[in-house]
Amino acid sequence: GGGSSVKPIPDGWAPLSPQYGMVFDAGSSHTKLFLYEWPAEKENGTGLVFEIQSCEVKGAGISSYANQPQEAGNSLRECLDQAMKVIPPARQRKTPAFLGATAGMRLRNKTAADQIMEEVAKTISCYPVDFRAAQIISGKEEGGYGWLTINYLLKSFTEVRLRLSLPAGGVLGALDLGGASTQISFIPHGGVKNPNTSSSYQLYGRDYSIYTHSYLCYGQDQARKQVVQRLVVRTCLFSLVLPRHPCYPKDFKRTVNLGEELASPCTNQQSAIQSGPPERVLRGTGNFDQCQKVVLQIFNFSGCQTEHCAFNGIYQPPITGKFYVSKTHVPGTPGAWVSGQTLCILPLQLRRSYPKEEEKRLQNYCGNAVYILTLLLRGYKFTEANWSSIKFKQHAGDSEIGWTLGYVLNLTNSIPQGKKKFIHEFKPWVASIFFISLVLLVAVVLLVASQNWFSPGFGKEGSL
């Protein structure tokens, strides 16, 4: 017949609700919200984390809101609203929420940075989540979390757990080429000699100690500003036209306001800006070799006091193992970049080759390619022998490569594992017996109460 039926639930452990975490990556040029999920049960103390949603915040990075900090907070609302639709209401207040700002905010003065961070914190704390913090993370943290992300997504930690030893070649190195800073992180042979460049993590029951360093002002956007700065130094202060820019495509023209272009702690050229006309014209020549010469000028290779050194006097052990490079924003393979023929060409040809790309990215293809090659070969000391060990990727599986997933992985170590509840099999006849027993119990209680009510002396004066 019709009607509903109760399905038996077998004896066993009740499944636990998954846990959630949300992290804003507030980069120098844009902000993105990532939503993660992991089972409440852990594996050797660390959660198995999955990216289930990402949301690009409209507008520029939060560091651009120095003059209107409240708008930095408001800009996050649309993505927060989307995330709250995905997280089950019962889990929302237990969902840790974090905003980490990177190099763009590291370059802001403290007053402006504090005001912006206060506004974004205020906005996130209005939502029913377990708001942990909105803070500027260090370059060391950014590099370390990025290293965790890549190795987790590419299952390096799984493979290591299956071995008795920890081969350096089995765990990948990470290179992050951001907008305002660049990070390098890997496990070197022989350990890390300088504790200032060392970070330690424990994942899935194993300890890891890595070399990691972040170079502020050497992300792709700030590197381009440093190149323009070098060109400004070489020109007459009152000339309307700057020297031809070898890193822009041939015959490309761009009018720049030097006050805006060089308004950064990475480019200390205030005197030159104030003395000359506010706007100048940049003309591209698309000359790969000349571009390489001016890019080399932003690095200091003579400041190394130790045997193992990258640039600007920073200690770095010799490169070892395979590396993944993220956020290159340059098409094609590095092998094709070397000639410069594919990227340092006429703007019209670039447009035909990459019809869907934004104009502002197209104009930077040539300079970015030269900069990345210079950074890797001259800065980080990769060679022809180990060049083939570098992979250029923006995603691994369904997840974006960045620091946020590594942060959540590390966070799950501090979140207590959920406790399971044992449930017994529930059969329909159990409900019938329970109901009959309840009726009998009520009848007995009523019977006893009625006997007391009608017993002699009950309710008379002085009987109490």
Image: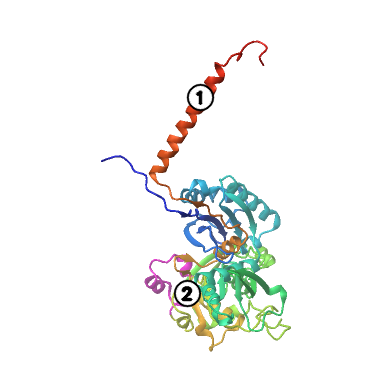
Horizontal arrangement in the rendering, residue 367 relative to residue 119 (left or right): left
State the image quarter where residue 147 is shown. Answer: bottom right
How many marks are shown on the rendered structure?
2
Please, what is the three-letter code of the amino acid marked with disc 2?
Pro
3D distance between C-alphas at marks 2 and 1: 95 Å
Residue 249, which numbered label? Answer: 2
Please, what is the three-letter code of the amino acid marked with disc 1?
Leu
Picture coordinates of residue 47 (x, y %)? 55, 63
Q: Is residue 12 above or below residue 438?
A: below
Picture coordinates of residue 139 (x, y %)? 64, 67
Tell me the crowding category of disc 1: few under 14, some 14 to 19, or many 20 or more residues within 10 angstroms, Cα based.
few
Tell me the crowding category of disc 2: few under 14, some 14 to 19, or many 20 or more residues within 10 angstroms, Cα based.
many
Quadrant (top left, top right, bottom left, bottom right) of the C terminus = top right
- Quick check: can you spot residue 27? no
Identify the residue at the far right of this view: 305
- Quick check: can you spot residue 461? yes
Residue 446, which numbered label? Answer: 1
Q: Nearer the viewer, residue 400 or 371?
A: 400
Picture coordinates of residue 182 (x, y %)? 60, 71
Identify the residue at the far bottom of this view: 385
Q: Nearer the viewer, residue 355 or 229?
A: 355
Q: Is residue 213 magenta?
A: no
Q: Which residues are magenta?
A: 342-365
Q: Is residue 344 magenta?
A: yes
Picture coordinates of residue 44 (x, y %)? 58, 67
Horizontal arrangement in the rendering, residue 309 relative to residue 158 (left or right): right
Q: Which is closer to the viewer, label 2 or label 1?
A: 1
